[in-house]
Amino acid sequence: LDPESGQMLVDRSHSGLVDFNENFAAQAHNMPFLAGDKSVDIRIILDQSSMEIFMDDGRYVMTELFFPTEYYSELTFSASGQTQLEEFAIREITSIWKHD
């Protein structure tokens, strides 16, 4: 996340299977946004093979697909400039699939 340049990047190059197409993870996906001098609300919904990113109450939305070879155990966030994390929470979402 780089508020000064107004760019959010998602790098899938180490996300699992990426070599099935030369363009799949060749470069990070870029979502431009206008942050100005205000805080940015970001909500991420992550499951085993996809990630939905919602910024500023859905003003900016990004979807990413992944093809993992094992369960993920690490998620990395980074930011540049004068970025400050004010609040962070992880919440589990109940599965819609019935488990017997």
Image (cartoon, helix red, strand yellow):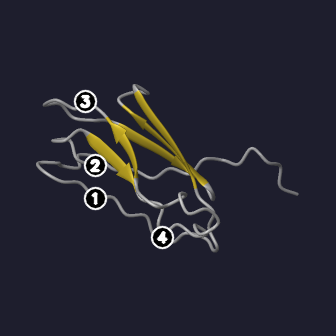
Q: Name the residue under label 2.
A: 1
Q: Which residue lies furthest to the right in this view?
A: 100
How many badges with numbers are in the image?
A: 4
20 over 60 or under it: above or below: below
Q: Residues within 10 Å of mark 2 (few under 14, many from 20)?
A: some
Q: Where is residue 76 in the image (x, y as percent from the top left)?
A: 37, 63
* Amino acid type of the residue tagged 2 in the rendering: Leu
Asked whether disc 1 touches disc 2, contact meaning CB atoms under 8 Å apart, the reply is: yes
Query: Which residue is depicted at the point 55% across and 58% down?
Result: 24
Viewer-side residue, 10 vs 72: 10
- In x, y percent, where is residue 35? 22, 32
Disc 3 residue type?
Answer: Leu
List the residue tagged with mark 1: 78
Q: Which of marks 2 and 4 is in front?
A: 4
- Amino acid bearing label 1: Ser
**Which is more toward the observer, 26 or 83?**
26
Which numbered disc flags the more N-terminal residue, 3 or 4? 4
Horizontal relation, residue 17 to residue 6: left or right: right
Tell me the SS state at disc 1: loop
**Contact? badges 1 and 3 (CB < 8 Å):** no
Mark 1 or 4 closer to N-term?
4
Which circle marks residue 34 in the picture? 3
Q: Residues within 10 Å of mark 3 (few under 14, many from 20)?
A: some
Give the secondary structure at mark 2: loop
The residue beneath circle 4 is 14
Q: Distance between the residues labelled 2 and 4?
A: 18 Å
Q: Residue at x 51, y 72 (%)?
A: 73
